[in-house]
Image (cartoon, coloured by chain):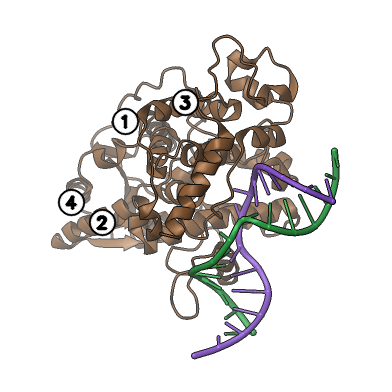
Chain colours: A brown, B purple, C green
Amino acid sequence: MSTETAVLWFRRDLRLDDHPALLHATERADRVLGLFVLDDRLLTPAGAPRVAFLHGCLRELADRLGGRLLVVRGDPAEEVPKAARQVGATSVHVTADCAPYGTGRDQAVAKELARHGIDWIETGSPYAVTPGQVSKPDGEPYRVFTAFYRAWLRRGWHSPARKSTVDWIVPQHAPEIPDDPDVGAMKLPKPGEKAAKRVWKRFLADGLGDYDTERDRPDHGGTTRLSPYLRWGCVHPRTLLAALADRRGAGVQALRSEIAWREFHADVLWHRPDAARRNYDKRFDHIAYDSDHTTFDSWREGRTGYPVVDAGMRQLLAEGWMHNRVRMIVASFLVKDLHLPWWWGARHFMRYLVDGDIASNQLNWQWVAGSGTDAAPYFRIFNPTRQGEKFDPQGDYVRKYVPELRGIAGKAVHEPGRRPEGYPEPIVDHAHERQVALDRFNRVKRP
DNA sequence: TTTTGAGTTGTTCGA
DNA sequence: GTCGAACAACTCAAA
């Protein structure tokens, strides 16, 4: 009787359903050690909300495994081989990580494992179509979403992986999940695979039909709210796409397209890892940015005097999450009204967002800044007041997050001007800053 | 190789 | 209030 042993190293795949890497491990081995490594290099820049959410996911996973999950802290290149050797594993199975840090880390781990004769086996990725698999006929990556989307649809994806029966190894000690970092009074989403399923099921029943329009309404909460779960792999996009396959309608199409945006940005970053830090479009290296920390602080704290901007920034601080429409508004405000570098905003988002994902975050910021792939035309500058009136027509979203404005009824809450006690005057004049932004763009275009 | 059509999410202004 | 045009040109994808 063979008694092969394998390690399933969990990273961004904190679930048990639709898990091809886990299935692969069980096909190859009789016994599997579940492992998670708390890596300070990833956790330090993450910020308290995302770390707390991660801990929650780990606790849920450990519970569902009856405690049979090894959680260690340290450098994966040391900890993974150590754990594998302790249980006599002949292979380590993972879901491929396609982001810049993860790919480098995995190379180092695989190399260490190889020294001990342990196989490194990647199965699947956090995407329906693994980054790098969709390319133009000439082999080059797509730079335009719509073209990518068509090719991505043509390529298609696997069905969800079948359930696996696993004989999980009992680790030497109980999972050591550290205490949560202090998140104060923040109200974070409920972590874990079960919560993800609940959110998804409810969205399928109530939200999908008019998702195409409702997702733009921060006052209604018509988005899927799945982003934190996708970030940590509590649910896989393939699972979602499978559920959409036999449904029709504008909502279905819109959601499929949003999922594709996530995959597009992962693909872009896979081809251009430098885009996580620098302008994708090098011409933007010559744009003049300000470096005013006073306005930056006002933006971070939600004290700009523009109601919908402040509501969004405060939602981020209160929930570790911000509505997608409002993310665009506050990002546009930082870049085009305050003339601050997009990476300042991106870093702040990454610190607070529970769903903070390097590819989606950085490339969406670059899209707003105009420096990314398929970027917004430079003259497309959001007017925070117009956006507020259009997408939060009754002002409910603003009043929810900006208590100083609760005395103003209806959409008048968006009007700059009459400021109640305690609420700041607008820190800049939008009409003026819009012109400044346009001028700076023009200067770059015609040097 | 050349050509053609198209490209996430807006705003403002004037009729 | 509603509507269409202007805002710029450029690059990309595909024929």
**Residue reaching furthest top?**
A421
Taking the spot 43% from the left edge, 61% from the top edge, the residue there is A268
Share a chain, discs 2 and 3? yes
Please name the amino acid that badge 4 sits on: Arg
- Mark pair 4, 2: CA separation: 22 Å
Subunit bearing disc 2: A
Q: Tell me which numbered mark, 4 or 2, is placed earlier along the sequence.
A: 4
Mark 4 and mark 2 in contact? Answer it, CB < 8 Å.
no
Q: Position of residue A195 (x, y in %)?
A: 54, 35
Q: Which mark is residue A177?
A: 1
- Identify residue type, mark 2: Gly
Label 4, residues with CA under 10 Å away: few <14, some 14-19, many ≥20: some
| 10 Å crowding of disc 3: few (<14), some (14-19), many (20+) | many
Side (left or right) of A427 relative to A62: right
Q: Earlier in the sequence, mark 2 or mark 1?
A: 2
Mark 2 and mark 3: Cα distance apart in space: 32 Å
Dot 3: chain letter: A
Q: Which three-letter amino acid code belongs to the residue tagged 3?
A: Leu
